[in-house]
Amino acid sequence: MTSPPQTHAPGRYPAGALAFPHRSLLAIGQLETHQILFLLDEAEQWVAWNRQPNKHTDRLAGLTIINAFFENSTRTLLSFEIAGKRLGADVVNMHAAQSSVKKGETLIDTAVTLNAMRADAIVIRHQSSGAVALIADKVACPVLNAGDGQHEHPTQALLDALALRHALRARGRASSDGHFNGLRVTICGDVLHSRVARSNILCLQALGALVRVCAPPALMPAQVDRLGVEPFHDFDAALDGADVVMMLRLQNERMEGQYVPSPREYRHVYGLTPERLARAASDAIVMHPGPMNRGVEIDSTVADLAGQSIITDQVEMGVAIRMACLDVLTRRARGVEHWA
Ligand code: CP
């Protein structure tokens, strides 16, 4: 099947420059605002495409994509796999638990091995911050960060922005320039260990949103205000008038020792219940990157709240964003360059 036409709003990107000049996608922090908008606009074609019965195109036919996951994943791994396959690429998944990493092979030797197989793009999730950038230095092809330690999860922030754009559009509140100017977003939970929080803070601020973060003192990064966010420990105060509430789970796998007294007490103070949500704007949008711990950071009645929760929309947008990223990052290798 032929691919959908590209749609780009004129004037969003600086004229005469390559619309996306990066070889790899390692962090939101590396992107200019117009490059974020470019990826979101590119993803729009795939949202529509993925809603058809036949979702296959041969745009990346002949290319090989390796998904190398050193940490568990459901959404990110599956959506990258689906994205690559829908674009016609050959997709191979490497699970660290069944790989020679278990025999003591180093990260660099693993990267050199993947490179020797002549992959056209490598998608990596790793438990160490900076590991993905290290691999990107050792391979010849584009590398996409699928989450590195507590550092960044750039495609999560992009899919969140796309889901938010669609939710605002459905409410008649989307701006014509694609920005989120003045939108009040509250991010609550284990901010300290969250790469999702960091990428979202950078992405949302680049698009003009006002970001509040809320966490118990032990789970708030030191000097978080340097990121330009408004920090809260009182969840009720953080929710006051919020247009968007993004909940994060407790990342127990990154904790040494006890950061919260118990899940029950955590829910009592930081759980998003229907009563708490009532403190936000009346039609506040509820988000969660998943996986959720229902009954801890978010109650089921809120997570499944029709008209306000967009958690499953986030998952849908994940495939479209990853299709856009794979398409854009392999353009140079395919001899296709997009000039703004
Ligand atoms: N949001 C997210 O990264 O989910 P997974 O860990 O399931 O990929």
Image (tube, rainbow, N blue to C red):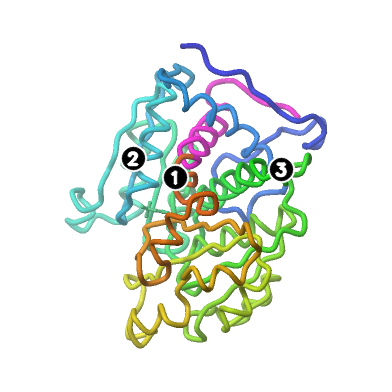
Splitting the image into 4 quarters, where does residue 122 fall?
A: top left
Indicate yes or no whether the magenta region holds residue 251. Answer: no
Q: Are marks 1 and 2 in contact (CB under 8 Å)?
A: no
Indicate yes or no whether the magenta region holds residue 338. Answer: yes
- What is the x, y in percent for residue 40? 62, 39
Splitting the image into 4 quarters, where does residue 72 fall?
A: bottom left
Q: Residue at x 62, y 62 (%)?
A: 201
Q: Amino acid at mark 2?
A: Leu
Which residue is labeled 3 in the image?
A: 172
Which residue is labeled 1 in the image?
A: 315
Give the magenta range: 317-340
Quarter that holds the C terminus: top right
Q: Residue at x 64, y 71 (%)?
A: 212
Q: Amino acid at mark 3?
A: Gly
Return the disc, 1 or 2, that comes first in the chain's sequence: 2
Q: Are marks 2 and 3 in contact (CB under 8 Å)?
A: no
Q: CA distance from mark 3 to mark 1?
A: 22 Å
For the residues carrying marks 3 and 1, which lies nearer the camera in this image? 3
